[in-house]
Image (cartoon, rainbow, N blue to C red):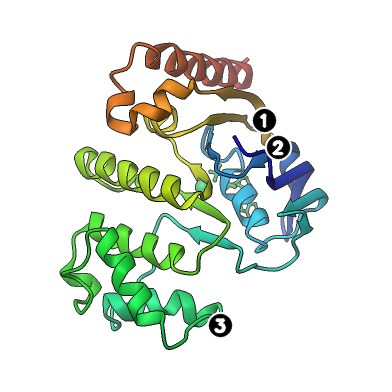
Amino acid sequence: MNKEKVLELKELSHIYVNASGAHLAVQHINLVVYKGEFISLVGPSGCGKTTILNMIAGLLAPTYGELKVMGETISSPSPRLGYMQQQDYLFPWRTIMQNVMLGLEISGKADAKSKQKIVSLLDELGLEQSAHKYPHQLSGGMRQRVALARTLITDPDLLLLDEPFSALDLHIKMQLEELVQTTLGRLGKTAILVTHDLSEAVAISNRVVVLGRNPGHIRKIITIPRELKEAGPIEARKHPLYQACFDEIWHELDEEMEREEG
Ligand code: ADP
Ligand code: MG
């Protein structure tokens, strides 16, 4: 693997301050992500997964600690990042083409070649028939693909994906995982995925970061054997090496729950 560092988190921490006081949400997050890696974040609800992504996206300032994307300190949203949130946020009054164009308009990258770029990306994501339709005419899985297209069209170095598949049926979800894995793999993109689906994390990632809470922290980083990644997300789930990885993450989360209860 190419050892170029795409993301570096050093002692990254965030304290929310509001009328009811200060709340230490995440503390001492240390992580280096290399080009082409696919990283999943898993952990109990409230452990700070979204807080971490929001800091990486430049939407939330770290209270302390350091955060670098491609070697540069981030202090505001950067065009090098693509952020896909759980809800697809497509504009109902815009066609699919216009919704994807928005990604380029916002980042100031729209030009004469934009339409052609969008057409070929939609084609690649199996949406060639949908360019002139409106979001309400598409299924949930298709809308998530449009949201993915809008994220990919700006050609970001790093993709942040916050539970993008969680609202989908299993079958659609696995197809989309495969599409994301092959598309990102071919484009050499780096991605960080938040998911509560451990099977998805094992099936799609190079490494899985298991988080604990109160305050949010990294418990363990588990490297997934190359064989699983190469098998693709659907076949990986049937691979002889799969269960041991799943069990290791499960065990880690189990201990985290016991620690909290005890
Ligand atoms: P996750 O995405 O893992 O479910 P979050 O990052 O949303 O977790 O939240 C982490 C912690 O920070 C939780 O305890 C949550 O209640 C708290 N939190 C999140 N957003 C805010 C906010 N805007 N103000 C105060 N506390 C918040
Ligand atoms: Mg969240």
Badge nearest the viewer, 1 or 2: 2
Residue 228 vs 22, above or below: the answer is: above
- In this orientation, which residue lies closer to the viewer: 76 or 182? 182
Amino acid carrying mark 2 in the image: Leu
Residue 179 vs 147, above or below: the answer is: above
Residue 257 quadrant:
top right
Amino acid carrying mark 3 in the image: Gly
Image coords of residue 4 (percent x, y): 69, 44
- SS class of the residue under badge 1? strand
Whether tag 1 and tag 2 are in contact, CB under 8 A, the answer is: yes
In this picture, residue 178 sits left or right of residue 159:
left
Image coords of residue 178 (percent x, y): 31, 41
Count up the numbered dots: 3
Q: Which residue has dot 3 on it? A: 108
Residue 26 vs 240, above or below: the answer is: below
Badge nearest the viewer, 3 or 2: 3
- SS class of the residue under badge 3? loop
Amino acid carrying mark 1 in the image: Ile
Crowd band around label 2 with a 10 angstrom C-alpha radius: few (<14), some (14–19), many (20+): some
Q: Residue at x 49, y 42 (%)?
A: 194
Q: Residue at x 58, y 57 (%)?
A: 157
Q: Which residue has dot 2 on it? A: 31
